Amino acid sequence: MMNQTLMMEFLLVRFTESLMLLRLHAVLFSLIYLVAMLENLIIIFLTILDQHLHTPMYFFLRHLSFLDLCLISATVPKSVLNSITFTDSISFLGCALQLFLVVLMAGSEIGILTVMSYDRYVAICRPLHYEAVMSRGACVQLMAMSWLSGGALGILYSAGTFSLNFCGPNKIHQFFCDVPALLKLTCSEKHATINVSVAIGVCYAFSCLVCIVVSYGYIFSTALKIPAGKNQSRAFSTCLPHLIVVSAFLLTGAVAYLKPASDEPSFLDLLVSIIYSVVPPTLNPIIYCLRNKDIKSALGKILWNIKSSQVIER
């Protein structure tokens, strides 16, 4: 039997060995994190405070912003801390928790993006049935299904990965704990559990992508029937960026999990992981909300109320 030792911690990859560049990396990631936090918190508070934003679309957007906030918080702060302290370590339990949270948030986000595409389909293609189809109860059920799907994937991936034996090198070729990078470190010969988990995840993501593409296909088909004008251009300008973001999120995740494993870390591996774990939480608020007239109006009202209250106090 192979001699096995208990792995107490892992070492995350450094972006560079230069202290100055590590500091620069910490500053850049900190700025990205703060911007993402600010954007998503603004959307969460606006959709709670403004009564006009208590609709299904903004209900889903609020949860998407919360997921984005949690997703980027699961990876970026640890990377920034390691760059500042010039350390690479993450505990075994910390790594397991990080993997669970990343998969939970990413899986739930895929579900919510699918629900949001369905919401837009009903709003544009079946407007007379919108209130009946997207009732409050239906919205809560769809949201719960998204969270439960992400939670199930998180449990499957983390349990499947950490049920394996780690008895060799402990350096993870990634800036956070992710399944493909961890599988390169295991000395277990059989990966049946995690292979089944990945297969389930791929089927889940692919089915969501099909639903999203079909929904937007119907939306574009309906938009083309509208006489050329403001409504048609608005439908395309709203839906095309959504479809591009969703496709980039799913495709980079698929590349990370399905491409053949390599023994040495590559720039492509890091770039792909950044695209699906850091970029969406930063860009989603801009694409889905901050270009939205209702969001801008709600933000303007709150800023005006704050300014008016300051004037009255004086």
Image (tube, rainbow, N blue to C red):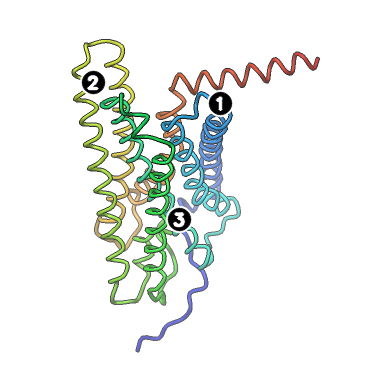
Frontmost residue, 166 versus 281: 281
* Badge 2 or badge 1: first in the primary sequence: 1
Camera-side mark, 2 or 3 = 2
- Identify the disc placed on residue 50: 1
x then y, percent, for residue 153: 37, 58
Q: Secondary structure at mark 1?
A: loop
Image quadrant where one finds the C terminus? top right
Residue located at (41% from left, 39% from top) = 139
Q: Could you tell me the amino acid type at mark 1?
A: Asp
x then y, percent, for residue 89: 53, 63
Residue lying farthest to the bottom in this orientation: 1
Crowdedness of circle 2 by 10 Å Cα count: few (<14), some, many (20+)? some
Q: Which residue is mark 2?
A: 223
Q: Is residue 5 positioned above or below 293 on the image?
A: below
Residue located at (52% from left, 51% from top) = 79
x then y, percent, for residue 6: 48, 78
Specify whether 286 is left or right of 226: right
* Badge 3 or badge 1: first in the primary sequence: 1
Q: Could you tell me the amino acid type at mark 3?
A: Phe
Q: Secondary structure at mark 3?
A: loop
Q: Which residue is mark 3?
A: 176
Camera-side mark, 3 or 1 = 1
x then y, percent, for residue 210: 22, 43
